[in-house]
Amino acid sequence: MTTGTTMLSYWLNWRVLLCVIWVLASLVIASFLIWKYEGTNYSKYKRRDTQQDGNETWKPCLSEVHPSWLLAFRIFAFCFLLSMLIADVVIYGVLMFNYYTQWTFTLVTIYFGLGSLLSICGWYQYHKSVKDFNVDTMSLDAEQESYVSLTYDHPTNTLPPAGIWSYAFQVIFQMNAGAVVLTDCIYWSIIFPFLAIKDYDVNFLTISLHSVNAIFLLGDTVLNSLRFPWFRISYFFLWTGIFVIFQWIIHASISIRWPYPFLDLSSPSAPFWYLLISLLHIPCYGIFALIVEMKHYLLSRWFPHSYQCSS
């Protein structure tokens, strides 16, 4: 049932109470984790890692890979995702942002847009520092007529420290990781089989929205140097919690169809679905964490002298 969502009786019942408890409990725990691991108690740790974090946003995981490759990949991904997002809005209108898929797809697009800007800044600073380092080295070795080969590890100390944008970029990456896995897994395992049974015409754009985001994010994960701490699953919970509360506000104001049937609070099984989706955040984030750990394990053994990620 989707009728009557603006009526007071729709919201004042035990089903809604349990769903509110699940959502608010997730938000409270997530907020506590953020306060614990990124609050003032960790200011010394954050100051110590500020320089390293700034480099992680634009530096590839292998020293042999030039930063230009990561920059080119992010620019291409941003342009491709933005074109798909624009096409989605043109075809279906802004009401498509009523879906979690479009929220996540937009966040992935923002990630690659911000990543492109940070990579451009890092690429510029890298070339500037390499040039200065090269001039100093050549002048010192002029008498010996020697040449010192360079990798971009040498001049990193001259780069500016990480700022709020570098921090936001890493948080968006970790939010995207869980949200993309959650979105695509639910679509391909639950929604797509249901649409196939109903002979629903699934077009290329719909399929791409639930696959291209994961492909590009995995490609960036293979190339980048970003860390993947477990406590930042809290931002993933916050992201989904904000979406759910947004849906509640919309449906309390306007009686419209729920974007996903399991969000309908009139169903007797609504508390079960809300709890299940909340618990699914853990394996979804864990799957991506496992991918990152596999990357650390394999690349650190295949390229022990050039791998430069912090696990």
Image: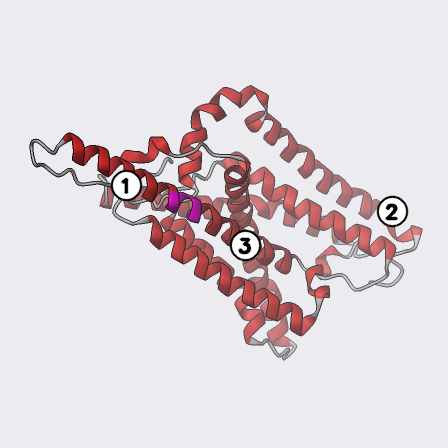
Which percent across, then down, holds residue 24?
Answer: 73, 38
Q: Nearer the viewer, residue 305 or 156?
A: 156
Q: How many marks?
A: 3
Observer-side mark, 3 or 2, equals 3
Q: What residue type is labelled 1?
A: Lys
Observer-side mark, 1 or 2, equals 1
Residue 87 falls in image quadrant: bottom right
Residue 165: tell me if it is visible. Answer: yes
Q: Residue 65 carries which label?
A: none
- Which quadrant does the N terminus fall into? bottom right
Residue 1: tell me if it is visible. Answer: no
Is residue 311 left or right of 112 when viewed as pictured? Answer: left
Which percent across, then down, holds residue 113?
Answer: 52, 53
Q: Do the residues labelled 1 and 3 touch (CB within 8 Å)?
A: no
Q: Name the residue under label 3.
A: 108
Position above or below: 40 against 247: above
Q: Are marks 1 and 2 in contact (CB under 8 Å)?
A: no
Q: Name the residue under label 2.
A: 13
Per the rendered image, the range of residues in magenta is 119-124
Packing grade of label 2 (10 A; few <14, some 14-19, many >=20) is few
Q: Which amino acid does label 2 sit on?
A: Asn
Q: Mark 1 points at which residue?
A: 131
Pick whichever of labels 3 and 2 is earlier in the sequence.
2
Position above or below: 35 against 308: above
